[in-house]
Image (tube, rainbow, N blue to C red):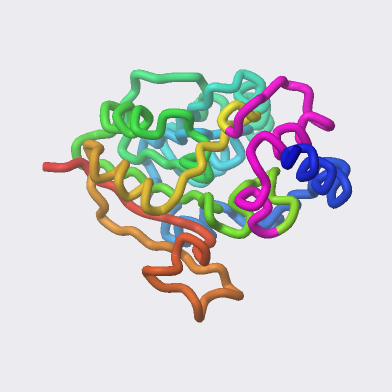
Amino acid sequence: MLTGIQYRILKRISPGAPDCGCAYEGKSKLAVLLGAEFFTRIEGKVVIDFGCGEGSEAVEMAVKGAKRVIGIDNRENMLQAARQKAFAAGVQDICVFASSTDETADFIVSVDAFEHFDDPAGILRIMSSLLQPTGEVLVSFGPTWYHPLGGHLFSVFPWAHLIFSETALIRWRSTFKTDGATRFGEVAGGLNQMTIGRFEKLIADSPFKFAALESVPIRKLRRLHNRLTREFTTSVVRCRLVKRT
């Protein structure tokens, strides 16, 4: 009964998919998230983009000086779109896309993907096998699960994904998505409910260690941001990972 009530409330608040907008329109997402010096660092290097999606960032890296870029994603429709972008930019010879690779890289980049991976621990092991001994993994992802909009599509309003049950939210989603998903992890792209604490534990149990870790506060909640509140007040998590020695 409670699920039915929650479903009707969701339908009343948002009868269709929310408009997610684009926070990086007119900007380089990589430069914003990984720093202006990022492109200098990857110049002449081999880069793997893990969770590349439609390939915009991979193509940008190729255009701006990377020696070779391999975009990895498990969704063939995304890979097809990415290949078209590489061709349109004239970098199809140095920027390729596949569901897996055996090539090793100087850098592995993962942007807005760790909150979506079905098996993030497994992904870290694969990354370790593909990274040169002196290489780095550059990660940026968010919002994390306890962020006001950490439910992504399910964030009808701030923290809606924590207030309403998974069953009610999935039922609401089924009114405009017909892929048959029954859990958060089954929606397009996946949603693994990643928190900052869980990410730190994943790294502690992985072949990597942090060379740097930063939880970037939500601008309007900056004054409230600290170690105790960070799960609810962090906008983006970004870090540099290196192999353990």
- Quick one: quadrant of the N terminus? top right
What residue sits 40% from the left and 36% below the top?
Answer: 47
| Residue 193 in picture, x, y percent from top left | 51, 42
Viewer-nearest residue: 8 or 117: 8
Q: Look at the image and give the residue range highlighted in magenta.
A: 158-184
* Residue extending furthest toward the left: 245
* Residue extending furthest toward the bottom: 223
Taking the image as shown, residue 54 lies to the left or right of residue 102, namely right
What residue sits 64% from the left and 56% below the top?
Answer: 159
| Residue 225 in picture, x, y percent from top left | 46, 73
Residue 40 seen: no
What residue sits 48% from the left and 33% below the top?
Answer: 117
Q: In this view, does 85 lie above or below 165?
A: above
Viewer-nearest residue: 202 or 33: 202
**Does the segment drawn in magenta span residue 41?**
no
How many callouts does the rendering have?
Answer: 0
| Residue 165 in picture, x, y percent from top left | 65, 42
Taking the image as shown, residue 149 lies to the left or right of residue 227, namely right
- Quick one: quadrant of the C terminus? top left
State the image quarter where residue 154 is shown.
top right
Q: In this view, does 202 lie above or below 210?
A: above
Q: Is residue 2 above or below residue 170?
A: below
* Residue extending furthest toward the front: 1
Viewer-nearest residue: 118 or 27: 118
| Residue 215 in picture, x, y percent from top left | 42, 62
